[in-house]
Structures are given as structure tokens and as C-alpha cells.
Amino acid sequence: MVVVNFIVNNILTQASITIALIALFGLMLQRKKAGEVISGAFKTLLGFLILSAGSGIIVLSLLYLGKIFTKGFGMQGIVPSIEAINGQAMNNLHLGNQIALTFLAIFVFNIIIARFTKWKYIFLTGQAILWMATMTTIFGHFAGLSGAALIIVGGFVGGVFAVAMPALAQPIVRKITGSNDIALGHFCTVGYLFTAGVAKLVGDKTKSTEELVLPKGLEFLQDTYLSLAFVMIPLYVVTAFFAGSKFGSTLSGDVNYVVYAFLQAVQFIVGVYVLLAGVRLLLAEIVPAFRGIALKVVPDAIPALDCPVLFAYAPNAVTIGFIGTTIGSVIAMFLLPKFGLAMILPGMLTNFFAGGTAGVFANAVGGKRGAIIATIAHGIFITLLPALLVVSFNKMGFINATATDVDTVTAALLFSWFITPILKAI
């Protein structure tokens, strides 16, 4: 078990190492020269770490925005956190070993399903699989499962999601990327498909977000980073004003709180720049390297990668998706309590990464109009599902707790509404 925990905690959950090892393995299977193998694996590692560095910069900036947003608009409610749920499961329920083994089981079932079915997708976002393992283990445990049964059932459910979600999203991903070289490996796919469905109903795919025609005086906004600054700087500065100088100064230290908000907005844009640079390097290396695995282990395998790999294809849609999802989540925050559900506070990290990806999906099928309308609906949808999950968590002793990624929430609701009643009836 010590060896398994070491592998899970130090290799498989370290996505950069996992993807670099896969690239190394793929290039070796193609009998590439030693120099090409080392170069390809290292550049894959480098590309992913650059992507991660960009994500890290964005995360820090959004955490700041989340704090001033909550303070500025006086909101109180539940902040979704799968990390907190994972900690309680390991410390209070002592399910750490089971989660680790379920994590490995999901990988194994993913490869088996991909090998013997027409769904040839290998899910490579290790952190997302860890959260799926956490949810299936917790809900399997409360359904009465234990030992090998708990791990096998949780691993199978997670393995099906790891293959099915990329498969369901792939027709739209092909439309976005123009190829079948990569798939989407992000457990928010139910939300993306919902958004694409709404965009198809209300949109006009002839007018893309990436073809915005601006007046001559605003043509500078056709630059991705300048247009991002045009949106994000006012958002941060105005929110800081609402939060007030007293609270803002507790975060800004010796720097004026408004100036600090401005700098945090610019840091956000820097993070996007770094992230997109990492995406370009990663894709240039991982796709050719993955051919070795596709040819030898799982014929015609397609790597399912984390959501930022799609950002470079429609950066304007990413911005629209972030804003639209935030608006939708704020609407849902006030709307859902009127129906007896918990108040779920907007999560800026989810709103950016999931919302941005939803914007790319909506634009692909519904153009600019679809992206604007559908991403607001996306914000409501991804707030509704965690609110429904609060009821189940409360019954299990997780008071005022819920998760964010809607695929893991869907898996949990699947256990709560269907699997658990069946098992208890048996």
C-alpha cells in the first residue's frame, strides 16, 4: 500500500510527470532515436509545466477576485470545494487507501474500455480522476460497499466517465480543433454539452466570436490580450471599490488597494499568456508522441487533455464564457434558495476554466449569440447541480458541503439516486 500511495501521490497525480512518461513511452514504441525520445519527453514536460504555471498565476488572481467579490457584494453561502470533501473523507472516514486504489482502478478500467470498445480515449487529467475517485468512493461507502467491491464499482463508474465524457464531447471538439488528434479530458463535460445544446437552439453559427468587427477606434481590441484587459481591469477595479479600502488593504498590504486590484487584473492576463504558450508547446509534442501508444497498446487511441488546450482556438469565446458563466452563477445564487435549495456562491476558478471552455463549445455550434446566451445558462446549470448535491451530503454528515466539477457531481447523484437504492433493496 505504501508503494501504491507513493505512485498515486507522487506520479499519477502529478500530471506533468504522467504526460511526460506517456510521451517517453510513445516515442520509444516508435523506435525513435534516444535524443528524440529525451527531447520529446522533456518538451512535453516543459509544455505542461508552462501551462500549469499560467494556470497557477490565473488561480492566484482569481482567488483574490473571489475574496473581494464575496466581500463587496455581501454574499454568504456555500463555497463548493472538492478538496475539502477529499480531506474529510481521508481524515474523518479513513477512506484514503480506498480512494487511492479506486484512482488506480479508474485508470485500469479506462484502458480496458478503450482497448475493447470503439471509445478510444485515454483520460490524462490525473487531478480530475482523483476527484472522481473521491466521489465514487464516498458515495459507494455510504451505499454499503466495502473492500474490493467498493474499489471495483467506483473504478468502473469512474472508468466509464473517463471514456464516455471525451467520446460525447468529441464531435464538438473536432469542430473546434479541425482534427481528431486530441480530445477533452475535463470532468465538466456534462455542462459543456448542456451549453452546446442551448447554443444550438438560440445561436447563429455564421457569426463567430473570433470574427468580431470593431470600429476603427477599437480595432486594438482584436488583440486577445488587449481585449481581455478591456474586460478584466474594470471588473477587478470596480469590485475592489465595492469591497472598500479597509478590506482591500488587508489583501494589498502596503500597496494602494485599487492599484493592487489593477495589478491583479494584469497578472490574470499574464497567466493567460503563459498558459496559451504552454498549450502550443504541449500539443506540438504530445500528439506525435502519442502515436506510439495508439499503435501498440490501444489502437487509434486519442489523448484526452485538460480544458486549457482548447483556449487557443477561440480566445474571445473564453472571455465571453467566463463573463457569461459568472453572470449565470450569480443569478442562480439568488434564484435557487427561492426553491428551497442551498445558496451556492460563485467559484471564480470554475467560472473561468469551465466557463471559458463552455464558451468555446457554445461558439462552435451557436456562434457569438449562442456563446453569450448559452454561457449564462451554463452558469445557472453548474450552480444547480452542486445545490442538489448538498442534500445528499447533509444526510452523510458533510454539512454545508458540495463539489464543483459537474461530471463528478453527476456521478455522485447517480450513486445517491439510483445505485444506493438498488444496493439497499438487494
Image (spheres, grey):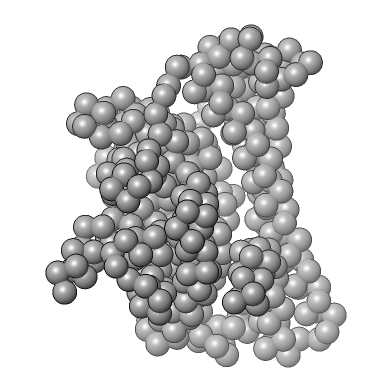
Query: Is residue 277 toward the left or the right of residue 136 in the image?
Result: right
In this rendering, does residue 370 appear at all? Answer: no
Quarter of the figure with the N terminus: bottom right
Query: Is residue 322 toward the left or the right of residue 309 in the image?
Result: left
Say which residue appears at 50% left-offset and 46% top-offset: 84
Q: Percent x, y for residue 406?
A: 38, 51
Q: Nearer the viewer, residue 46 or 87?
A: 87
Q: Nearer the viewer, residue 2 or 388?
A: 2
Q: Percent x, y for residue 225?
A: 65, 34
Quarter of the figure with the C terminus: bottom left
- The vertical placement of 105 against 233, above or below, is below
Say which residue appears at 37% left-offset and 34% top-offset: 344
- Total marks in image: 0
Task: Check the image and name the residue furthest to the right.
Answer: 35
| Residue 248 image-quadrant placement | top right
Task: Check the image and name the residue furthest to the left.
Answer: 425
- The vertical placement of 65 against 84, above or below, is above
Q: Nearer the viewer, residue 39 or 206?
A: 39
- The vertical placement of 374 against 339, above or below, is below
Say which residue appears at 65% left-offset and 77% top-offset: 3
Say which residue appears at 21% left-offset and 70% top-offset: 423
